[in-house]
Image (cartoon, rainbow, N blue to C red):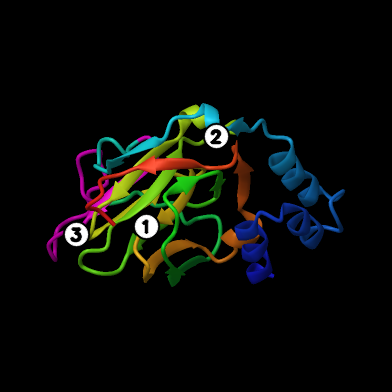
Amino acid sequence: MSRAHAEHVSSGDLDAEAAAWNDGPDGEWGSRLGRLWRGWPRAATSELPPLRARTATRANFAAFGELVAESEDGELYDATAGGIDASLDLSQGPPRLYLMRLDGPRELSVSMITRHQRVTQCLGALGEEKDFYLVVHQPGDEPSVGGLNAFRVPPRHFVKLHAGTWHAGPLWTRDEHRTFVNLELADTNITDHDCVDLVAGSIPLLVDAAAS
């Protein structure tokens, strides 16, 4: 069912997703998805400016998660604001660490965002010079277009998202597949995957043409 779930979400077919998980769209899970998908106020993209992407740093990404860079072997754990590590919460179920292959290009724009409330998801690209883009919104039950932020995650870094951080991505422009290290829970894509369609269309990202 996890593959079916991914297909429904990627295609925007939340009616099929609702019917699949809990006795049709009138079940508890189906009703929840229906409220998120159909009942959310969506803005017209013609009224919205593009999102300008910033290169993520430990400081500017702090409201959404933590940026983690490579460190020397033997360096001690430090997840403070000025540290180098991520503070993880994997206590709500068996963790799942896997390699996720995605095909590009993946359009630098956003229309739908998702969240996982029970885990601090971690995501990073394999490869010495592989950067990517991520759109994020602080945790909360009422995400808005005005709260969206776009970031470029530089090479040799990964991001940890706070539990409940809304996100879209990873995104990149080159016609190539990329492999990502993904850390979440074993059932994240089945039981902890809320989606919201924020706009009727999509909002483009403004990025440095030399990147990705």
Q: Is residue 35 left or right of residue 90?
A: right
Q: Provide residue 170's location: percent of width, then percent of height.
A: 42, 56
Look at the numbered disc 3 and give the secondary structure of its residue: loop
Predominant SS of the magenta segment: loop
Which residue is depicted at the point 25% across and 43% down? 55
| Mark 1 vs mark 2, CA separation in Å | 21 Å
Q: Provide residue 122's location: percent of width, then percent of height.
A: 40, 56
Q: Is residue 136 left or right of residue 159?
A: right
Q: Which residues make up the magenta segment?
A: 63-84
Look at the numbered disc 2 and give the secondary structure of its residue: helix
Contact, CB < 8 Å: mark 3 with mark 2? no
Which residue is depicted at the point 28% across and 35% down? 60
| Mark 3 vs mark 2, CA separation in Å | 38 Å
Q: Earlier in the sequence, mark 1 or mark 2?
A: 2
Instruction: Classify 10 Å Cα crowding around label 1: few (below 14), some (14-19), many (20 and above).
Output: many
Which residue position holds label 3? 70
Amino acid residing under circle 3: Glu
